[in-house]
Image: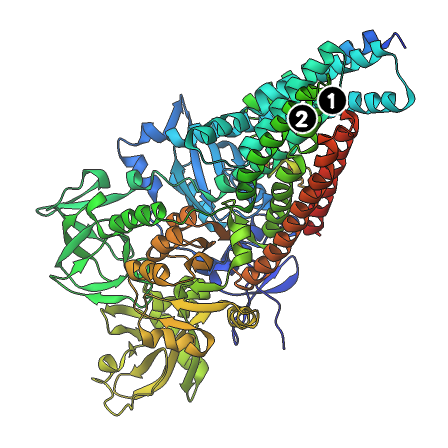
Amino acid sequence: MSQAPCHHCGEEIPKNLAIQSEIDSNFVDFCCYGCQAIAEFINGADLSNYYQHRTEKAHSALDKAPQDNQFSLIKETELYPLYVFVDNDTHHIQISLKGMTCAACAWLIENRLKQLDGVDSIHINLSTSLASLEWQPKEIDIIDIAKEIRFLGYQGNPYRADQTDIEMKQAKKTAIIRLGIAGVGMMQVMMSAIAIYAGDIQGMQQSFKLLLSWASFIFATPVVLFSALPFFKAAIRDLKTRHFTMDLPVSLGIGLAYVSSIYSMLSGTGHVYFDSVTMFTFFLLLGRFLEEAARHKSYSNNRNQQELSSAWLIQGDNQTEIPLSKVKTGDVIAIKSGENIPVDGIITKGSTCIDESSLTGEYLPITKCEGQKVVAQTINVEQNIEIKVTAIGKQTRAAAIERLTDRALSEKPKIAKIADNVAHYFVILVLACATLTFIGWTIAGSEDAYWIMISVLVVTCPCALSLATPVALTSATNKLKELGLLVTRGHVIESLARCQHIAFDKTGTLTHGQFEIHHIESDDQDHCLQIACALESGSIHPIAKAFKRTSHYSAEDLTNHTGLGVEGTINSVRYRLGNLKFVSTWANDITETSFAGLTLYLVQENKGLIGTVFLQDRLRPHSLEALIDLRKNKIQVSLLTGDTKESALSVLSPDNFDHYKCQMSPEEKWEWLNSQNNKSNILMVGDGLNDVPSLAGANTSIAMATSSDLAKVHADAVLINSHIETINLAIKLAKKCQLIIKQNLFWAAFYNTIMLPAAIMGFVPAWAAAIGMALSSLLVALNASRLSK
Amino acid sequence: MESLYLLIPIAAIFVFIAVGIFTWAVKKDQFEDLDREGQRILFEEDDNDKA
């Protein structure tokens, strides 16, 4: 029986799981209690329209990272005025939101918050994922507002713009104005141009032609002088660095056509090309604008994380909460159960389990006791501990990874774009041809030498050539976004097409990165599961996530035994759930079952074994099929995991991979990528902090939607729908795009080869050159539009 | 056809006014959110939010 996917997040529902709710008088299924709680909350608030309006599924509640409440920190410290603007009784704050997937999410949050008393206004900007909120602190606490956001399944953090954000915002505004002016200018010039072309064919008074030329000139001037400015600036940079990119022929084309059009308008001879100039500028700007917009979107607004972290400083018997920036080496701080560890340190009191998955990829927490080291960016999942700080900020292990990332980035191979390579030789060729033509005709004594040279330049005008690549890339980028891959760097599509080898991280990339119940061995499986769920209900250990379902029982006196298991009382009977060592004190006749994964034993005091629960990390749906498909298409796949071999083997067999590497540190991953001989054709797919150097250093990289922010910023593309098979589709599309680019370039080259000699010989009148150029650009654009089908 | 001498400049003035309004709108943050506004009309607005 195939089950419907989760009502809230659209994930596949694990077998034997029945979480149902009645929503709008229909019974619907969920993949986890998190999703159910969110859906019920939304329904309860009369906002279930969300489900009808949304165009993208929500993120699964299973993928949520643990979080600390940053609002309580700003509320209680001197940071408040930095984040909150106070106007009498009304306070104003900006909140950066995580987890929004489409316009319906913004609608949902706005409408929920508007229902609350004390919220004056709320406006959400979907492009930047920022909410601006005005509220009355006398009536409602900001912490409660943040809680409401969390109930809806999103995460909100206080936000304030830093210098880079302000500059980025300004740059975006300028880009929109440039694009708008180019668009309007193009349309106006086109109208006059059509009249002029018609006049050339059926005859027109010179005075009207002059009028229309002047009109074109007036509309084209702002386009050239303002909208096209970025191309000219880049061309000047190219000249200085002696590395020619497409910007140089583009600028030459725009500049020369514009200047010669003015000349011909004033002298009343020749032809005006204002229409070509404006259209050309508009299309190129549009391509660049879309690329920029995608890149900005993938950066989340989280630069002020550091400032908003806090720590509990221990002085004698007192604990005080202080901003992290005030913590010094040598201080002793308390790390509560469930908290992120913000610094490197040594445990001075207590023992606990640490989730180091963000650094190593190992998703099973590691037991640490007094005297052992803990590192920043990991999570304390069991007992409260105290640590002595050994390194802060830039000195921590996590910061070392960031430095490694910077190095990897600087060594990233420069991707030679096809168009730029072509451009380099093309510019030299065109300029040489034009100059020789001019010299030749002058020597031959022709008065038309200048006009013939202009014809040569216009005929060879790099319009079709420089449009050939960008239009195809723009259309492929849009299509990829529909498929679920957000491209943030321009070279991605070209390198995807060349991809021969994909290196995957395991935890969080191919798998969900958390445990789930594989099967239960017991006489009464349901009873066993119910007891286990009750016992685990108080634990924040990653194992407990597998048991997040409601139980008939409620457990008392729950105790976590670090690195062993949990113990508790249900209906005055004591139970233990944990590893063999932990339960063997109560039942010493248990034989160990071999299982690739994690085995938990449930025993009852004075009675013995009740059942055995087998846990495994869960593969993302269709990951395996996607890997097989990739290999069918002759693409090598490798696994690079920081996890131990046993835990890797438990979910993925080496048969599915060409290379199978375990227990790799972030450095080793990057070095391994570098050591491969076809490294320019490798694609890296990862999510965690430990993948960041490889993501940054790899020729092409894709980060998962649930990745750390650092991973997303350094990857070349983000897999928004988290489906591995999308990569396969993307590669296919990239190959098709490559084919279309080649067809376009071939056409441009073919056209030039035919027309250039004719133009040099003076056979092509200027108007024919202009029409030919426009038609050939149109052909190129239409060909590219085939990609979006 | 001589009317063109008048009509084209008038059209030009309108275009410049339109561009001026557009620029003003961009500077007033009207184009901040390019993803959402197009879909806003699809959502029902409840005016009696505060229950």
Which amino acid, mark 2?
Val
Which amino acid, mark 1?
Val
Quadrant of the drawing holding the C terminus of chain B: top right
Residue at image x 91%, y 22%?
A202
The residue under label 2 is A277
Residue at image x 47%, y 64%?
A501
Residue A187 image position (x, y, % from top left): 73, 25
Q: Reading the chain from its start, which is encountered first: label 1 or label 2?
A: 1
Using the rendered view, name the quadrant where residue A237 is placed.
Answer: top left
Q: Is A530 in front, or is B11?
A: B11
Extreme residue in the left direction: A316
| Residue contact between numbered discs 1 and 2, judged by CB atoms under 8 Å | yes
Q: Is A728 in front, or is A394?
A: A728
Task: Say above or below: A748 vs A601.
Answer: above
- Chain letter belonging to callout 2: A
The residue under label 1 is A189
Residue A606 image position (x, y, % from top left): 25, 87
Please give the label number shown on residue A586.
none
